[in-house]
Image (tube, coloured by chain):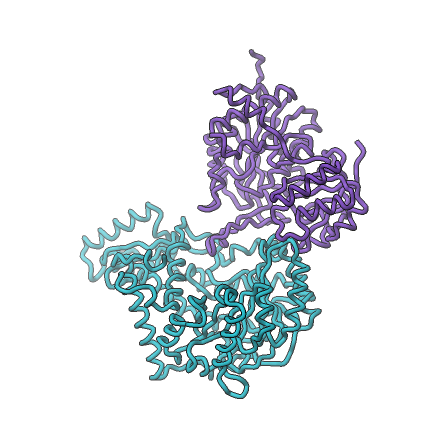
Chain colours: A purple, B cyan
Amino acid sequence: MEKKATTIYPYSKDDIQLFRYAKLIGDIQPVYAVSPPGWGLIGKDATAIDGGKPSGIVITENLDSALQNSELLVIASFEHYVGEEGGLKDTLETAIRYKKPFILLSPPQTPEEQIALETAKQLGLLHWSSEQDYQNIIALASEKDYCDDLKSPVTIIVGQGPYTSKFETQLGVRQELIKRGYKVSQIGSRPYCELFGFHSFPSFMFSRELDETQKIIAFNQFIKQIENEEEPDLIIVCVPGGIMPVFEKAHNNFGILHVEVSAAIEPDSVIYNLYSNEYSTLFYEKSAEMMHYRLNHVKTNCFIMSGSWIDYGAYQENKEFRIIKFDKPYNKIIEKPEEVPSLSIFEKNVFEKATDAVVAVLEGYNLVDHY
Amino acid sequence: MNSSIPFIHPFRTLGGYYLFDVNTNAILPVTKETYIYLEYQLAGNGKQIVEVPVLSCEEVQIAQEWIKNVQEQGFLSSKRIKKIQHYIDPYLEGILENYMGHIILQVTQSCNLRCKYCTFSGSYLNRSHSELMMSEETAKKSIDFYIDHSSETPHLTFGFYGGEPFLNFDLIKRLTLYVKQKARGKKYGFFMTTNGTIINEEIVQFLVDNDVNLFVSLDGPKEVHDRNRCFVSGRGSYDVVMKNIELAKKLAPEYVAKKIGFNAVFNSETPFCSLSRFFTDFEAIKDPLILATHQNEYSLKEVEKRVLKPEDLQHYDDLGYEIYKNMLYRNGRLERQDISKIVLNWEERDRLEMEENRKLAIEVPDNYHPAGPCIPGARRLFVTVNGDMYPCERVSETSGACKLGSHDTGIDLERAKEFLNIGCLTEEECKNCWAGRFCSACIACADNGEKMDKNLKLSYCKMFKENAEAKLKKYCSFKEFNISTERQYN
């Protein structure tokens, strides 16, 4: 597929994977990263801001100039953007002004933004958007009152909380499995995973209109349909958010989503991403035990320590839940669990090792042919 | 220190005997006999105790049984801190790279007042007024540095400080425009501390337009305020400040009601009742935010340190009376409007420390640092008129010992680590101190103007320990008398 020179705006650390895994993304070739000046990234290398290898692409603040030299615009999330000037509405209008096709990673939030998007759609500029329709699945699920069995082995990726490098893990393990010749069906934790060639986590799992049982059955049907269509060797599901409360107010919805997902698909193994810390062997053992009981008797494949750390002091001082994201491995893995690999996101070949662990579990799957 | 001795601090109140268990951060009520036994054990430096002169053999046995029992439950551990190291230490570099909290720009060192206790008035070591103004280039470079190092900070906060910052109002106006341009895409806000004497119509409009959080230094009623806060001529500044507040109120009543707070500095010369009453009945602003603090004694010249005089007793009598009224309020005998806001604020601070923030622990970590130091540079980076960087505006910016870096070279990481781990200066004392969790010693306590001074830092320890014990006693006394904190703080 012919790659298109692409600008990403508003660029943040969350979008690094668009650069790092550009190979997986259809026709996108990121060449410009444009960020609002207040985000403190101007002048820094687009892929070095999380400690990764520099790309040589320096983050700038001039969207107009970047667009003049691009064929495509990726409009990233405005969740952390404050202010009207330079916001989503302005960005859509800029895309219209330059007649640039764009990919929209998160939906409009205001009527004004929606109007601007409609105008752009009428002009044929919307190249792709993350909006998905799950009505068929919900309808299918409403006719059932049980879950179907899955034939394929299922690995899930979960994190202690947000910012535990889950997305990077999904992409890294996926790339490695494909390289080894496996056929993988995958459901990722972000709403734009289709860009990378797999499925996004379905929005109905956050719906207030479905009860918990309906969600479990719908998720089961969602995965079953994918399994039937794609006939994978393996299914990987990454669950957004965190598996358990970290503090009183950072409760991660008590990990309910994780319980629902495991009830729906009965995973075989799990990759557990952790906040950076110096964990004891006992911690790893207890964590694997928790996984087993909380996630439907799942076996822990491996632990991956992320580059994020919870500032417990900030919480104690002013009840602020602050996650510090590092670009270097500040915590070393001192004690290791005996049976399960414990890896760091910063170590070389981390995803190869994680994939080894996934494959090791799969090798024991369905050893005896049976019906 | 004998390693078998429980790491505890025994204390008593009128109604009971207690142990503060350093490892678990718990307060354990004990019998009088157990208290005596443990005090005896601590005094004997952990020697095996068979008999205690004032206790019977049976009482000793009961005490030993109780200790054994609670130790089995995880309390009264003898574990000590192995190394003084702040928990942030391994992460400091990353925090200073992307998580800076505030920046405070000293836009001028010039001031039109000569407050007697001001750090620039000549009463403090190495600090005095000058006419220096910050250049626009230095200010912009510092703002750029801050934005570059706060990519993960959700809210940027810019402070303008002096001298009297409005003496460089033109620069402040240009800098707010610069910030608006440079901070686009993120939440940001401004705050200023002023003596309130220069406020005019244009300044009020500027404050409103930029939604500036303004702190006005106001020490209380005219006779109190004018005692210290004087113009160069010696004339008190109270009337001018109040006239300006009235002007601001007339021009922008909503802004004044929401965005203006007051800094009140007092010492034992100040009649506490009149100060407290002034802010309780303050007519200019209803229910203002008041930050009342005792005069800073760190780095104060020896000759300027206050020696108690007979007339100072009035201050303490007043203070005692206000605290007594507060107790009556807690018991439902008085209403909230009758209580000193200053005392209420102090009580709330103590409650947070003792109730909300005092979490139980399993044990003290091997590497631990007493509470006290902030994260230098990341909390309130203070940039002087010359572009030198300091951990906050409260340390002496003319002391080389407190300098953290400059807008040209950035923050010196090694220096920041030294400030963060200031307890290393007194490592042995800190490792065995029971009050580490309540400590508030930072570099300001150790700076002698030239270097960090161990003996100077140690000279504050007695005060910190007494404060900690007073908090523990107060907390336990309230529990004994079943005095509700609900009424106090809701």
Residue B310 appears left or right of B34: right
Q: Quadrant of the C terminus of chain A?
A: top right
Q: Percent x, y for residue B454?
A: 49, 70
**Position of residue A300 measured from the top left corner of the image (x, y, whole percent):** 53, 31
Which residue is at 51% across, 57% downward?
Answer: B86
Q: Quadrant of residue A43?
A: bottom right
- For the residue pair A215 and B65, the one nearer the viewer reads as A215
Determine which quarter of the picture holds residue B158: bottom right
Looking at the image, residue A194 sits to the left or right of residue A2; the answer is left
Q: Residue furthest bottom?
A: B233
Q: Position of residue A11 (x, y in %)?
A: 68, 47
For the residue pair A188 and B237, the one nearer the viewer reads as B237
- In this view, B420 is above or below B447: above
Residue A173 at x, y = what percent? 65, 33
| Residue at the outermost top position | A371
Q: Is residue A222 above or below residue A254?
A: above
- Residue name at image x 37 percent, y 51 percent: B77
In the visual, does A168 lie left or right of B444? right
For the residue pair B25 and A111, the one nearer the viewer reads as: A111
**A339 sits to left or right of B350:** right
**Relative to residue A125, is residue B395 depicted above or below?**
below
Q: How many marks?
A: 0
Query: Can you see residue B82?
Result: no
Q: Name the residue at 39% across, 51% down.
A: B360
- Observer-nearest of B149 and B177: B177
- Res. A166 in view: yes
